[in-house]
Every structure is written in C-alpha cells, then in structure tokens.
C-alpha cells in the first residue's frame, strides 16, 4: 500500500500544483486587464491634454493676431492725432482770430457736460432722467 499511497500523495500534490497554477494565471490575467484599463485611461487623458494644449495654442495665436491689429490701429490713430495736433498748432500760429477763440472760455453748457459723471450704461442714464416728463406717443404731432 505504500506504493499506492505514494501515488495518491503524488497525484494530490500534482493536483494542488495545477490548482495553484490556475489561480496564479487567473491573477495574472486580472492584473493584465487592470493594466490595460489604466493604459487606455492614460491614453484618453493624454488625448484630452493634447487637445487642451492645441486649443490654448490656437487661442494664444488669435490673441497675438488681435494684439498686432490693435498695435497697428493704435499706430494709425497716433499718426492721425499727430497730424491733427500739427494742424491746430499751424492754425493757432497763423491766425489771430483762431488764437483768440482757442484761448477763450468754454461755454457753460460744455463745462457742465464735462463736470457731469460718466454714464456707464443704461441704468446710469435712466437714473439721471427726470421721472415726471413723459414723451408723446410715436407719430403724434408736437404742439409747436
């Protein structure tokens, strides 16, 4: 019986080794599936990052283009302003009547407009409109 018992023990050991091998392979496959899932997630994250970088680069290029246009417009305005200021200096230098007009006081209405606060929107405008004055309906003729 020793031979049969030895064969049974050897068979049981072989069966346990096969079961342990199967469990090990199953664990390796689970690790592989997890690694593949992490890889696909990392690829998706990289694609999203690359898309964000491209969008930011396009936005930066657009902003740079707008800045160049703004600089060109500002340069044109500065050139035109210098021309206007030159014309004013020339007129002031050659015309005594213009010099007298330019050195005179501003009309009271203009001074009042310059001292009034700046309107920054429709709400500011409506706050300064008198409440009791109504407008006539559109299409109605005025009295005068």
Image (cartoon, helix red, strand yellow):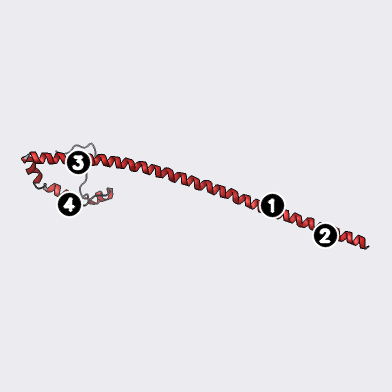
Give the mark nearest the N terminus, 4 or 3.
3
Q: Which mark is residue 82?
A: 3
For the residues labelled 3 and 2, say whether their Cβ atoms are less than 8 Å apart.
Answer: no
- Element assignment for label 4: helix
Residue 93 appears at what percent x and percent y? 9, 41
**Residue 5: quarter of image:** bottom right
Q: Which mark is residue 29?
A: 1
Residue 108 appears at what percent x and percent y? 11, 48
Q: Real-space Cα distance between discs 2 and 1?
A: 24 Å
Crowding around mark 1 (Cα neighbors within 10 Å: few <14, some 14 to 19, many 20+) is: few
Crowding around mark 2 (Cα neighbors within 10 Å: few <14, some 14 to 19, many 20+) is: few
For the residues labelled 4 and 2, say whether their Cβ atoms are less than 8 Å apart.
Answer: no
The residue depicted at 72 percent of the width and 53 percent of the height is 25
Asked if residue 4 lies left or right of residue 107, the reply is right
Q: Which residue is at the front of the view, 122 or 59?
A: 59
Q: Can residue 45 be seen in the rendering of this structure?
A: yes
As drawn, 84 above or below 45: above
The residue depicted at 21 percent of the width and 52 percent of the height is 117
Give the mark nearest the N terminus, 3 or 2.
2
Residue 74 appears at what percent x and percent y? 27, 42
Quarter of the figure that contains the C terminus: top left
For the residues labelled 3 and 1, say whether their Cβ atoms are less than 8 Å apart.
Answer: no
Q: Which residue is mark 4?
A: 115
As drawn, 31 above or below 96: below
Crowding around mark 4 (Cα neighbors within 10 Å: few <14, some 14 to 19, many 20+) is: few
């Amino acid at each position: 019986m020793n031979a049969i018992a030895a064969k049974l023990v050897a068979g049981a050991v072989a069966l346990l080794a096969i079961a342990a091998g199967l469990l090990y392979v199953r664990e390796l496959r689970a690790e592989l599936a997890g690694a593949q899932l992490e890889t696909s997630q990392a690829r998706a994250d990289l694609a999203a990052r690359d898309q964000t970088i491209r969008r930011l680069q396009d936005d930066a290029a657009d902003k740079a283009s707008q800045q160049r246009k703004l600089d060109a417009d500002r340069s044109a305005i500065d050139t035109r302003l210098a021309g206007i200021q030159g014309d004013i200096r020339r007129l002031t230098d050659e015309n005594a009547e213009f010099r007298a007009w330019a050195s005179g006081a501003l009309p009271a209405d203009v001074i009042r407009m310059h001292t009034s606060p700046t309107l920054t929107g429709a709400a500011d405008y409506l706050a300064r409109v008198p409440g009791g004055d109504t407008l006539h309906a559109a299409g109605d003729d005025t009295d005068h």
